[in-house]
Image (spheres, rainbow, N blue to C red):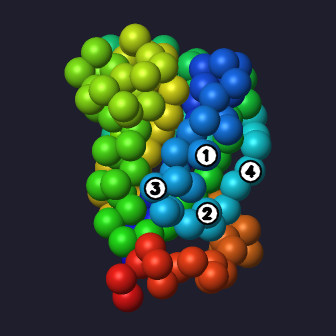
């Protein structure tokens, strides 16, 4: 079972798209592990986006992600990382497939609404960065056997 960090970024929160995003992940069959609504500190933003330090868009990215609260979540499921990135759509909204969140609600790469982990290892690392162990909820759903093959 893979896990992915998902953030509804400040633009998604301001535009009232938290529910829209959650509904899509729930409908896909993914299982929610953790959620919290927080205003991200500069330290957390810099740790989260460390791989982009030095790039031209880095300063703008840090001010974007700290500009208003975010809805931070962890979702799990088989192949969750790839499945969630597919539901989210490509980084550049104008290249995102129709039906994805970024296609359906965004136009600009710097206002692309959602963050999702890019690899299973990133999912584990980002989950540990954003959530304490005791905030992660281990549970089973009555419908799990109808969504998860094993
Ligand atoms: P991802 O969010 O799809 O994984 P990354 O390449 O990891 O995309 O970039 C992280 C975030 O940085 C993007 O989601 C976007 O918000 C922002 N970003 C990436 N490239 C640009 C850019 O060229 N201009 C402005 N913002 C960018
Ligand atoms: Mg990324």
- The image position of residue 75, as x and y in percent, is 53, 60
Mark pair 4, 1: CA separation:
13 Å
Give the residue pinned by disc 3.
28
Confirm or deny contact between disc 1 and disc 2 (CB under 8 A): yes
In the drawing, what numbered circle is on residue 32? 2
- Give whichever of discs 1 and 2 has the lower sequence position: 1
- The image position of residue 63, as x and y in percent, is 58, 18
Mark pair 1, 3: CA separation:
10 Å
Please say whether residue 59 is visible from this viewpoint: no
Q: Is 33 left, or right, of 146 in this rendering?
A: right
Mark pair 3, 4: CA separation:
21 Å
**Quadrant holding ligand 2?**
top left
- Give whichever of discs 1 and 3 has the lower sequence position: 1
Q: Residue at x 50, y 62 (%)?
A: 30
Confirm or deny contact between disc 1 and disc 3 (CB under 8 A): no
Q: Is residue 94 above or below residue 150?
A: above
Instruction: Sort mark 3 into few (<14), some (14-19) or many (20+) by Cα contacts within 10 Å.
Output: some
Give the residue pinned by disc 4.
36
- Give whichever of discs 3 and 4 has the lower sequence position: 3
Q: Secondary structure at mark 1?
A: helix
Q: Secondary structure at mark 3?
A: helix
């Amino acid at each position: 079972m893979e896990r992915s960090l998902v953030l509804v970024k400040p633009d998604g929160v301001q535009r009232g798209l938290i529910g829209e995003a959650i509904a899509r992940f729930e409908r896909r069959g993914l299982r929610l592990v953790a959620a919290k609504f927080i205003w991200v500190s500069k330290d957390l933003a810099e740790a989260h986006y460390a791989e982009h330090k030095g790039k031209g868009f880095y300063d703008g990215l840090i001010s974007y992600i700290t500009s208003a609260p975010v809805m931070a979540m962890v979702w799990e499921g088989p192949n969750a990382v790839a499945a969630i990135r597919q539901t989210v759509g490509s980084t550049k909204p104008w290249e995102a497939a129709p039906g994805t969140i970024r296609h359906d609600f965004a136009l600009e790469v710097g206002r692309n609404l959602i963050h999702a982990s890019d690899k299973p290892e990133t999912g584990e690392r980002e989950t540990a960065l954003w959530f304490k162990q005791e905030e992660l909820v281990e549970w089973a759903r009555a419908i799990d056997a109808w969504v998860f093959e094993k």
